[in-house]
C-alpha cells in the first residue's frame, strides 16, 4: 500500500446515451488504469457520475418532450446500465442532482464570494426579442471568433475547440428559432480567474503532463479574465444570494465539484461520512482526471483555480491523461445526424471485451483516432481470435487431451525454454510500465506480442510430436507447462483491458478466485502442479463479413 489515489472520469452529460467516443476518451482508459492499480494493491478510488444541470440538458429535454428531472433520470439510469455492460468498474457512480452536491457547491460559492473572488457585474448579454428572454450559451449559435466556423456553439467551437463567451460570437442567433439576438444588460456573478494567473502558471510548471495538455493550459492561463459563473436558466443549482433570484450556477462551475460531492456520497454509503477527506484533504493523495481534450481547461485551469480560492487545502490534480477525439468512420459522432453506433444494440451482437480491446488498441492518446467497422472486424479476427484466442485454446485443449486437464510439472529447460520464460517476464515488466504511464496502445501491442511468442514456441516445440515418444515425457511436460504459464501470463496482463475473457482463462486454468482481485505479484509465480483445469471453451468467435455489412448499412441508412 502506498498513498491514496483518486481517479475520476469526466462526469457524463445526462442528455444522451454513452457512445464509443465517450468510452475511448474518458471511461475505458480510466477503468483499465484502475483495474491495474487494484491488481498492484494500491489504495485507489474510482469516482464518476452524471452531469445533470446546464443548458445541454434543457435543450435535449425540450426536444424529447420530458421534464428536466425526467430527462436526467432516464439517461442517468440508462448510462449506468451501459457502463455495467461494458465492465466499467466505478467504485461509485453519482449524480449532480443529489442533495449533497448542491450543498457542497453552494458552500464553495459562498466562501469564494465572501473572500472577494466572486464579483457582481451588470453587463450586456444575448437576448432574444422573439422569445423575450436571455439565452444561455447552448441556446446560441454563431460564427466562431477564432476559426470562423459558422455553426459554432455559444460556449465553445466544435470545430477548433476554442472556448469563449457567447457574446464573442459573430452574428449570434437563437438555436431554437434562428432569430437574431441583441445585447441587453443583465446582472451576473463572475469568478476572478485573473487573480490566480501567476499561481496557476507556477503550479503548471511543476506538472509532467502531455505537451498538448500543458500547451493548451498555458494558452488559457495567458488569457485568463473574470468569467461568469451564473446563468439565466430554470434548471440548475440556485445562486445562494437573496439578490440572485432566478439565477443558477453555470454548469462548468458546479460539475467538477461533483467529484468531491460524489466522494462524500460514497463515504456516506460506507457508513463513514468523513472517509472522503482521506482522498481530497490529504496532501499525500494523488488525483488523476481522465478526460477528453475538450475538457482540458475545465480540469487544468478553472477547477484548480476554484480550489485555490478556498481556505481548505483541497487536492488539486496531479495527472491529466487527456485523450484526443475518437471519430466514427472519419466523422464526429452525432446522434442528431444519425452518425452513431447504438451501444445497446452493439452489445447484442458483439462482446464488451471486443470493443474494449479495439478501443484500447486504437486509443486516441496523441492524435485523433477512428472507429472503423472493417478495422474492428480485422482486429477482432486477426488479433483477439487468431492470435490470442487461438493460442489459449490450442494449449488448453492439448493439456486436456494429454494430461486429463492437470497442469504438468516443468522439469527440464533448454535454451528455447529459458528464452520463452524470459520473454514472459519481460512482457510482464513492459506492460506494467505501459499501464503505469497510461500507454494503452503499447499495452495492447505487448499482449499480442506475447500471444505471438507463445504460438511460435508451441509450433517450434511440436508437442504433438513429442507426445509420440514416451522417452520425451519430461520434454513434453516442460513444453506444455511453459505454454500454460504463458496462458496464465496472458490472462494476467490482459485482465485490465479485457476482464471478462481474462477471467474465463483464469477459470479454465482451474482457479475459483476472481483474477482482478489477484495481486500483480502472482503473475510471475508458477501454476500449481497437478491443479485440475476445467474443459476449455473458445474465447472469441469469428466476425463474418455479412455481420459487418449489416452494421455499415445500418449506419449509412440512419444517416440519410
Image (tube, rainbow, N blue to C red):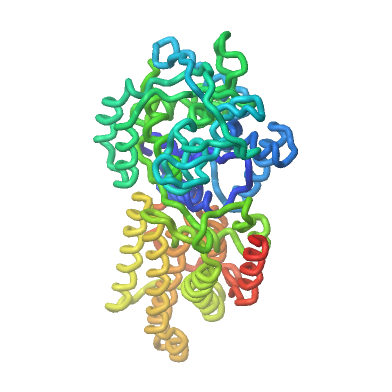
Residue appearing at x 63%, y 65% in the figure: 556
Q: Quadrant of residue 490?
A: bottom left
Residue furthest right as drawn? 65
| Residue toward you, 171 or 367 | 171
Where's the C terminus, which quadrant? Answer: bottom right
> Can you see residue 356?
yes
Residue appearing at x 48%, y 55% in the figure: 326
Where's the N terminus, which quadrant? Answer: top left
Residue appearing at x 49%, y 26% in the figure: 275
- On screen, residue 2 versus residue 17, left or right, reads left
| Residue toward you, 250 or 465 | 250
Residue appearing at x 32%, y 54% in the figure: 433
- On screen, residue 211 versus residue 299, left or right, reads left
Total labels: the figure holds 0
| Residue toward you, 365 or 122 | 122
| Residue 224 in the image: above or below residue 368 | above
> Can you see residue 522?
no
Residue 86, image x, y percentages: 58, 53
| Residue 265 in the image: above or below residue 465 | above
| Residue 240 in the image: above or below residue 50 | above
Residue 222, image x, y percentages: 29, 32
Residue 88, image x, y percentages: 55, 48
Residue 10, image x, y percentages: 49, 40
| Residue toward you, 30 or 471 | 30
Amino acid at each position: 500500500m502506498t498513498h491514496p489515489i483518486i481517479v475520476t472520469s469526466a462526469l457524463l452529460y445526462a442528455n444522451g446515451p454513452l457512445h464509443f467516443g465517450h468510452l475511448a476518451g474518458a471511461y475505458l482508459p480510466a477503468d483499465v488504469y484502475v483495474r491495474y492499480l487494484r491488481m498492484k494493491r494500491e489504495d485507489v478510488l474510482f469516482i464518476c457520475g452524471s452531469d445533470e444541470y446546464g443548458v445541454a440538458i434543457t435543450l435535449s429535454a425540450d426536444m424529447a418532450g420530458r421534464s428536466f428531472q425526467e430527462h436526467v433520470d432516464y439517461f442517468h439510469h440508462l448510462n449506468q446500465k451501459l457502463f455495467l455492460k461494458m465492465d466499467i468498474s466505478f467504485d461509485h457512480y453519482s449524480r449532480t442532482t443529489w442533495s449533497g452536491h448542491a450543498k457542497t457547491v453552494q458552500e464553495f460559492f459562498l466562501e469564494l464570494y465572501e473572500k472577494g473572488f466572486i464579483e457582481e457585474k451588470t453587463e450586456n448579454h444575448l437576448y432574444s426579442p422573439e422569445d423575450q428572454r436571455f439565452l444561455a450559451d447552448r441556446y446560441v449559435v454563431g460564427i466562431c471568433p477564432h476559426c470562423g466556423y459558422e455553426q459554432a456553439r455559444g460556449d465553445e467551437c466544435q470545430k477548433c475547440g476554442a472556448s469563449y463567451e457567447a457574446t464573442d460570437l459573430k452574428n449570434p442567433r437563437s438555436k431554437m428559432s434562428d432569430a437574431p439576438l441583441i445585447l441587453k444588460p443583465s446582472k451576473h456573478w463572475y469568478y476572478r480567474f485573473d487573480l490566480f494567473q501567476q499561481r496557476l502558471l507556477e503550479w503548471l510548471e511543476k506538472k509532467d503532463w502531455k505537451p498538448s495538455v500543458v500547451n493548451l493550459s498555458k494558452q488559457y492561463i495567458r488569457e485568463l479574465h473574470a468569467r461568469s459563473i451564473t446563468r439565466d436558466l430554470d434548471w440548475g443549482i440556485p445562486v445562494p444570494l437573496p439578490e440572485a433570484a432566478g439565477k443558477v450556477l453555470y454548469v462548468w462551475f458546479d460539475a467538477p465539484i461533483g467529484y468531491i460531492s460524489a466522494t462524500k456520497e460514497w463515504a456516506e454509503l460506507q457508513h463513514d461520512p468523513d472517509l472522503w477527506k482521506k482522498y481530497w484533504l490529504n496532501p499525500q493523495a494523488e488525483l488523476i482526471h481522465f478526460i477528453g481534450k475538450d475538457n482540458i481547461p475545465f480540469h487544468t485551469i478553472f477547477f484548480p483555480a476554484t480550489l485555490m480560492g478556498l481556505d481548505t487545502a483541497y487536492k488539486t490534480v496531479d495527472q491529466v491523461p487527456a485523450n484526443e477525439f475518437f471519430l466514427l468512420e472519419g466523422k464526429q459522432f452525432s446522434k442528431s445526424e444519425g452518425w452513431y453506433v447504438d451501444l445497446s444494440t452493439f452489445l447484442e451482437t458483439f462482446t464488451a471485451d471486443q470493443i474494449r480491446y479495439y478501443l484500447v488498441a486504437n486509443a486516441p492518446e496523441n492524435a485523433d483516432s477512428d472507429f472503423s467497422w472493417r478495422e474492428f472486424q480485422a482486429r477482432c479476427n486477426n488479433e483477439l481470435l487468431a492470435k490470442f484466442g487461438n493460442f489459449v485454446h490450442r494449449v488448453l485443449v492439448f493439456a486436456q487431451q494429454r494430461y486429463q486437464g492437470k497442469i504438468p510439472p516443468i522439469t527440464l529447460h533448454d535454451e528455447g525454454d529459458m528464452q520463452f520464460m524470459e520473454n514472459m517476464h519481460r512482457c510482464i515488466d513492459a506492460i506494467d510500465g505501459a499501464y503505469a504511464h497510461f500507454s494503452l496502445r503499447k499495452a495492447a501491442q505487448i499482449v499480442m506480442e506475447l500471444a505471438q511468442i507463445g504460438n511460435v514456441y508451441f509450433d517450434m516445440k511440436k508437442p504433438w510430436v513429442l507426445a509420440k515418444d514416451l522417452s520425451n515425457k519430461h520434454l513434453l511436460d516442460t513444453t506444455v507447462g511453459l505454454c500454460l504459464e504463458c496462458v496464465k501470463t496472458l490472462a494476467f496482463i490482459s485482465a485490465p483491458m479485457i476482464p471478462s475473457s481474462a477471467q474465463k482463462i483464469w477459470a479454465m486454468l482451474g482457479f475459483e478466485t476472481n483474477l482482478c482481485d489477484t495481486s500483480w505479484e502472482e503473475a510471475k509465480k508458477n501454476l500449481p502442479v497437478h491443479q485440475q483445469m476445467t474443459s476449455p471453451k473458445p474465447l472469441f468467435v469469428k466476425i463474418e463479413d455479412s455481420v459487418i455489412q449489416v452494421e455499415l448499412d445500418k449506419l449509412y441508412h440512419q444517416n440519410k
